[in-house]
Image: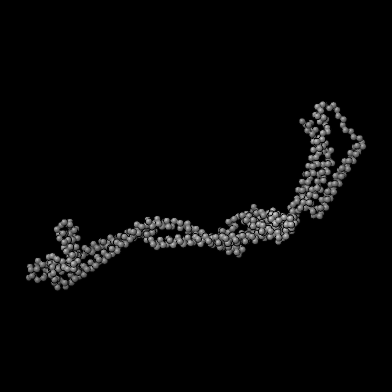
Amino acid sequence: MDQQQNQQIGKLLDLFLRWKAFIVFTILISLPVGLLVYLKTQKVYQATSLLSYQQQKVSPNNMSPEIEAAIREVVSSLTQIVTSRTNLETLITDLNLYQEARKKLPMEDVVELMRKSIEIEPSTLGDTFQIRCSGGEPDEVVKVTNALAAKFIEENLKYREEQATETSAYASDELAMAKETMDRKEAAMRDYKLKHYNELPEQRQTNVSQLIALREQYQLKQESIQDLEKTMILIQDQVSNRRKLISSQSDLNVEDSRAGTAQAAQDSALSPADRLIQLRGVLKGLEVKYTDNHPEVKRTKKQIARLEESLAAGGSPAGGTTGSVAVPVRDSADPVILQLEAQLKNVQLSIQNINEEKESLKKTIAQYEEWVAAAPVREAEWSALTREYGELKRHYDLLVSSDLQAKSMLNLEKRQKGSQFKIEDAARFPEKPIKPDFLKIIGIALVCGAGLGFGIPFMWAFLDSSFRDVNDIETFLGVQVICAVPLVLTDKEKTWKKRKLYLGTGTAILLFLCIVALYAYFWRRGLIVV
């Protein structure tokens, strides 16, 4: 196995030695060919401008575009505007670019050609981005790059102002619609409150407390009436006893004749209304002691009924219980009786006033009971009416804040105090082209020359059918070779071979020096840029 490898290596060395002149020639000739390709290739220059995105120093809100969109999104949007056909066509016309291309191609193709030469790349670190423009003329790419940078600044200001204007207009329209809705809702709520204020759920506890207090007042009024009626009965008893006392002290001679009529005189001394009040007091005292079937109770009720009928008819009561006997002058002039009668009238007036107050309290209690009973219904109606009010109020407050912020942003943009693009590094005249790459072209030329120099001998060896090795003959004929006669050179042939080697080496060296001189010539003229 080692012998076969050695034989293969020997064959390769022999092959390279036989083709060494060709290999060296192709490698050397590839150098001027590469130089020629480099010189013939059109030079492409590139100018670069660095822009930064300056955040606004005054930020009254959180609606500014730099917060709503990242720098990449802003640059992407403005890139579409700056590289639009209208802007590029204007730029081509103003700077008189692509003169030859405009003669041969329509403007759409020229614009597309220029668009391909423009590269806008946001930076991965910080709010910066670069604008690059490539072209065959250095001064043109500088002008185009700076013009694009200025266009970015101009379009950014215009874009931000338009965006702020649209945002402000939209916020104002939304606020107007929300305000109209809120006004209608609040008007309906206000009308409902004015109509059913005392029946609303928040008034229920107050109404209940007030109702309890009114009922207590009503009960106190009732108790006051009962106390006054008892007082009235006591006063009537005192008046009756006083009159009896006066009657007993009257003329003793007529005592027997007037004994039967003493009670009638006593009764006639009272007015029908006072007598009615007295009988009602007596009836209440009897009802406490006896049932309704007791004879005394029945008799008293009949007397009360006759008095009420008599008072209703405007006459005096019928029957023998009361007569028309006049009250003695000394009875009516008695100061004690007059005082008691005055007290009795005051008590009756107080009872009448308290009854009127009771009726008023009764109506008020009924009103409060109605309000308390209506509270659950009003609560359901109020909940349905105000169900959407909370969300409407929050939405309205948000729109008010947004409208103020949008107007502040619009004012900032009109005064050009918002976020702006700033040229940090303007495009400069490119001294070295980015294309073609000298070292890359020469390297490719050398690789191609070496490939050609080594490839052709391999192909020739593959196609050559002559035998150059004993093993090849034995393999081909299948017969063992007994001996082989080596190549023997004469002295003349050896001398010629040496001369040929020296001549070839000198020629290669001379060719190499010529190539070096050629490279140096173009280098000194500035046609080669590394």
Q: Is 331 displayed left or right of 66 in the figure?
A: left
What residue lies at 35% left-to-right and 59% top-to-bottom? 371
What residue lies at 20% left-to-right and 70% top-to-bottom? 339
Which colour style is shown?
A: one colour
Classify residue 49 by image quadrant.
bottom right
In percent of width and height, residue 167 lies at 56, 60
In percent of width and height, residue 247 lies at 12, 69
Q: Is 60 displayed left or right of 229 in the figure?
A: right
Q: Is 422 displayed left or right of 454 in the figure?
A: left
Classify residue 342 by image quadrant.
bottom left
**Quadrant in which the N terminus is drawn:** top right
In percent of width and height, residue 155 lies at 64, 60
| Residue 518 vertical position relative to residue 486 in the rendered view, above or below | below
For the image, the number of numbered tags is: 0
Depth check: 169 or 283 in front? 169
Depth check: 158 or 290 in front? 158
Is residue 23 visible in this depiction of the protein?
yes
What residue lies at 17% left-to-right and 56% top-to-bottom? 291
